[in-house]
Amino acid sequence: MLPPKANAGFVAAMEEVLDVYARPYNPQRPQVCIDEGGKQLLGDVRAPLPVRPGTPRREDYEYERQGMANLFMVFEPLAGTRRVEVTERKTNADFARLLRRLVDEWYPEAETIVLVLDNLSTHTPAALYQAFEPALARRLAEKMEWHYTPKHGSWLNVAEMELSVLARQCLDRRIPDLATLGREVAAWQQTRNAAVTKVDWQFTTADARIKLKRLYPTIELQ
């Protein structure tokens, strides 16, 4: 959703993210987009009827609510790789642990990890200091370059698009618990990574200044 009128803050943040996407692929400075989504866990009250010739699998309309799960999407669009972390919650500590894996396990050889993420209150270097001792928090924070999508500009985060694909291809059915969710998501991730599915981002800052001109403040010359 776009803001209803010209907004200098929106424009500045949008152009910053678009400039990041315009950078060429550099394995020493990987561009990594992070987003998160929820999945309601639902159990069957009665066992589903299995698939039979000419008859699809059938579920009873009743179900049991088993709580919510969180999914962190970590997506590198230029490399075509994604990692999905399934957690019970999405607290500062959960986000901090995700960033530690990002730095120390997934991109240990990178000089700088270029992050694109939204302005959720947990998405700040402060989360690292709440979860780890200061020296470790500082080391992790310095390894990352932070870029935030503007308010009402979540469409600029490619990880949101990848979460949408995950929802359509893997999550559009009842999943009863975290363990099952983790297995299903891991299988989806493996298949999609094996296909090296990338994103070729075409919308540039120059395009935005033409197509989204109404969002730019009008400058009155004195």
Image (cartoon, grey):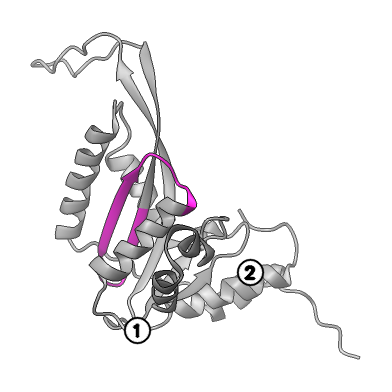
Left or right side of 25 for 53: left
Quadrant where the C terminus lies? bottom right
For mark 1, give the secondary structure.
Answer: loop
Circle 2/circle 1 CB separation < 8 Å: no
Give the residue displayed 34% in from the left and 59% down from the top. 74
69 is higher (above) or lower (below) than 154: above
Q: Residue furthest left?
A: 53
The relative height of residue 87 versus residue 154 in the rendered view (above or below) is above
Residue occupying the far right of the picture = 222
Q: Residue at x 16, y 51 (%)?
A: 191
Q: Amino acid at mark 1?
A: Pro
Q: Residue at x 50, y 75 (%)?
A: 18
Q: Between tags 2 and 1, which lies in front?
A: 1
Q: Which residue is mark 2?
A: 212
The mark tally for this picture is 2
The boundaries of the magenta stretch are 73-92
Closer to the chain start, of discs 2 and 1, is 1
- Along the line of sight, which residue is nearer the eye, 152 or 33? 33
Q: Which residue is mark 1?
A: 24
Q: Where is 63 relative to 184, above or below?
A: above
Q: Position of residue 50 (x, y in %)?
A: 14, 15
The amino acid type found where label 2 is placed reads Leu
